[in-house]
Image (cartoon, coloured by chain):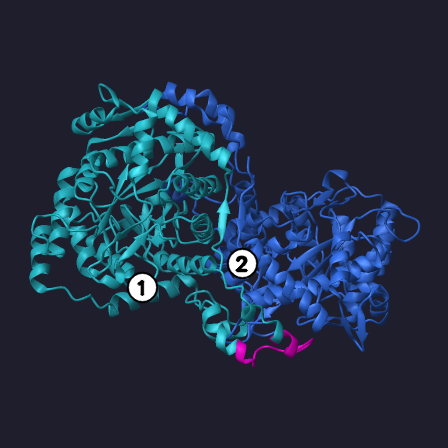
Chain colours: A cyan, B blue
Amino acid sequence: MTKPTLLTLVPEEINKIKAASLEILERTGVNIDHAYAREVLQAAGAKVDGERVYFPPKLVIEAIAKAPRQFSIYARNPKNSIIVGAGDPVFAPGYGAPYVTLASGLKRKATFADFTKLAKLSGSSSNMGISGGVLVEPSDIPEQNRHNAMLYACMVNSDKPFMGSATGEKHAKDSLRMAATLFESDNGIPKQPVMISLINTITPLMLDERMVGALIAYAEAGQPVIIASLGMAGATSPTTLAGTLALQNAEVLAGITLAQTIREGTPVIYGSASSITEMRNGSLSIGAPEGAWIIASAVQIAHSYGLPCRAGGCVTDSKTLDLQASYESMMNLQVAGMAGVDFVLHAAGILESYMSVSLEKFIVDDEICSIVRRFLRGTKIETEDLAVQLIDEVGPGGQYLTADHTYQNFRTEFWPPTLSNRETYDQWRLNGSLPMINQAEKRVNEIIDNYEIPYLDKSIELKLKEMAGI
Amino acid sequence: MTKPTLLTLVPEEINKIKAASLEILERTGVNIDHAYAREVLQAAGAKVDGERVYFPPKLVIEAIAKAPRQFSIYARNPKNSIIVGAGDPVFAPGYGAPYVTLASGLKRKATFADFTKLAKLSGSSSNMGISGGVLVEPSDIPEQNRHNAMLYACMVNSDKPFMGSATGEKHAKDSLRMAATLFESDNGIPKQPVMISLINTITPLMLDERMVGALIAYAEAGQPVIIASLGMAGATSPTTLAGTLALQNAEVLAGITLAQTIREGTPVIYGSASSITEMRNGSLSIGAPEGAWIIASAVQIAHSYGLPCRAGGCVTDSKTLDLQASYESMMNLQVAGMAGVDFVLHAAGILESYMSVSLEKFIVDDEICSIVRRFLRGTKIETEDLAVQLIDEVGPGGQYLTADHTYQNFRTEFWPPTLSNRETYDQWRLNGSLPMINQAEKRVNEIIDNYEIPYLDKSIELKLKEMAGI
């Protein structure tokens, strides 16, 4: 039962990229728009000049060594606690899109009702390990308490782990207080890791005040963070994929060094979201094969540091749930899975280079997640599996349908599809040959109509609701 | 520039499967419905009892060692000659479907006109290394000369290598004579490898008279053959994927042993087409993740013998060019490519578990082939690619769009899509947001309307036409 492994780089190539990143961190440095962060790093040995922080290799290497290779995130339902970095990828839904694309193809600004529906889809999915973060940006909630409203919806609609706000120190502390309330911790901080947050660098080589503020708040509270870089090769990072990997790596290491300097052992995930620029219009392409190659390579780099990695997802540049959305999503999720990714943000729903989410695509992507998980499971190669005795008994020209061995094994060996159609042509016509997007639409409604919100103590729910200001 | 590599089995597991196959070949044997084949194998050391042939391990191992790891197939246009087993996969179009599915979704029996169109699509594709074999089964050509008519269409509409008929000794000899005519060889046999043919076993453990007859004719003529097995796990092979791999391997090795016994050094490709049975209706599923896992594993087994491998393709169970067709095709082609497959039959057009071909899907699959090829190409990781100097010059917050480095590299580093849409939402709406299937339909017509049939000496063409009986 070997885990499928995809390798795109040999160790010598990984070392070249890592050496380049250390050189960038030492020679060029990173602009960090946060005075306290600069102070802390300076005290740890970094050179600071204005906003610019120059990282000595020793500081970076020692910081990386302090980060755990795997860690748990505890859910209020213990059955839904997850381990990041233990071998199987954790899937999390799409994050941050301002729009929703309907089954009709029409697109509109996302609302809190959309958000809640997505939280339910995520809650009901056996593939999603995380209920959500910014499932969409609900335009009908005022910005000042949007982060709390979103967190409330994730917390009450599902008993899985969730994602905290990353838009500044204040928002992060709001998230921590709500998590403490949910987990009934007195001092405003959850007692153990119960959430994860997405800290993005600004490429090239910048960390802004809001993200750093959130990072520090979570690190001080012992809560996991993803430190992610999104370089657009050709626009915000070098056109060569090697250069983009080196730059991305430098940025992620800067963030991880800060997190470990704030608090040793902070659970961090090495996040890679870089891809290429479509040179015809200067836009980000997340469905490009070069992006898929970066995914696989970033996983190898992260693992060479002993860090869990976030990369990939069912991501696409397509504007609608179509053939392109389908093949790009499969390409990116499959590559991430095979490369051994630990955490997959955007595993369901994303369209249009992160600009929109489709509820129907969430359902199709959930099927793709199942497919990839089945592939990754592989199979046993033991004597009873090789079935030489059975093959001899059946002999040339025989059949296996009625063999006990078949009956004993098919349920565990074969993955049962939910959406993928394996009917004969005639069955398919007879059964209405409903397009997958319409099947997915039906499934969305079924899930939402029948969704059972997990039990939560009424007094806790009321407190959370009050904190959320809704 | 490392070639991406996908591994699903460790050497110990490969050895277990190989040992199981040798045990099957020795203990259970294979029914070979061809007296001369049995005689030849018996003379080489096999035990024969009625139709059953039992293979001693030594015979099999020695035969495998005689087969080349790579070989050339020469095209009449030398630029189109191909090497099988040199590292890059050779793509060949879909093979053997009796139906054509139209863009409207309607399905009908395939005709010779469809066949000719497919030969042109294949001829025009920069991804397809082979013009075609049974591109579809043209129902309007009488069966007795259908094989010759198909070969004629492949030979005249394209100057790429082609596939010979595998439906019996007589048909194979017809193909050889036509190839000899095309290449102006006097003795009815081409002087070098110019074609390849698909020899299928009948699972479990049978080789029928027609396939063996063709195999012998091609082996004697020094023309390459694919020896392929298609086990349906749970119906014609064990439900456990391990057992299916062991059985498939035994069958392929039996065919290769016969080919090498007929003529040492016959170029052979180890062919894996096995997948699982959909237990709800007993039909073959070629879009299943278990099938993809078998693809990757078979490539590893073949390579461990020093044999080139055929596996994978843009194959799907879907009845129409839809989301499922798209993600299953990407899954299967990507896995094959990453595993290092040498020859990909069914790389374009297949729908409905091999039952039908779509011309529009041919175009979409051709895009998928391009995507996978770009991924497989990887990138260089040299000093100039890592661009540390440039990163320093651009600095934090800068941009790379106007850098010389970008201008010098983007054309080689970035793959330019043909169908995949990377417009912004507004551009896409403004430009008509034509669904990909309709774009593909337009492209089919453009290619066929503008197709330039490559030059062929008129007298040769007339001879071929006469031989084809059309």
The residue range painted magenta reads A390-405
Q: Is residue A130 magenta-colored?
A: no
In this rendering, the answer to whether A264 lies above or below B132 is above
- Callout 1 amino acid: Val
Marked residue chain, label 1: A
Q: Position of residue B162 (x, y in %)?
A: 74, 51
Residue A429 vs A132, above or below: the answer is below
The answer to whether B167 appears left or right of B186 in the picture is left
Q: Which residue is mark 1?
A: A444
Q: Are marks 1 and 2 on the same chain?
A: no
Instruction: Choose top left, top right, bottom left or bottom right for residue A118.
Output: bottom left
The residue that appears at 49% across and 60% down in the rendered structure is A1
Q: Residue furthest right?
A: B186
User: Pointer 2: what residue?
Assistant: B292
Q: Is residue B468 visible?
A: no
Q: Nearer the viewer, residue B149 or A367?
A: A367
Numbered disc in front, either 1 or 2: 2
Whole-percent x, y for residue A320 in the image = 39, 51
Residue at disc 2, secondary structure: helix
Disc 2 residue crowd, few under 14, some 14–19, many 20+, Cα 10 Å: many
Kindly identify the amino acid type of the residue bearing the numbered disc 2: Ala
Q: Chain of mark 2?
A: B
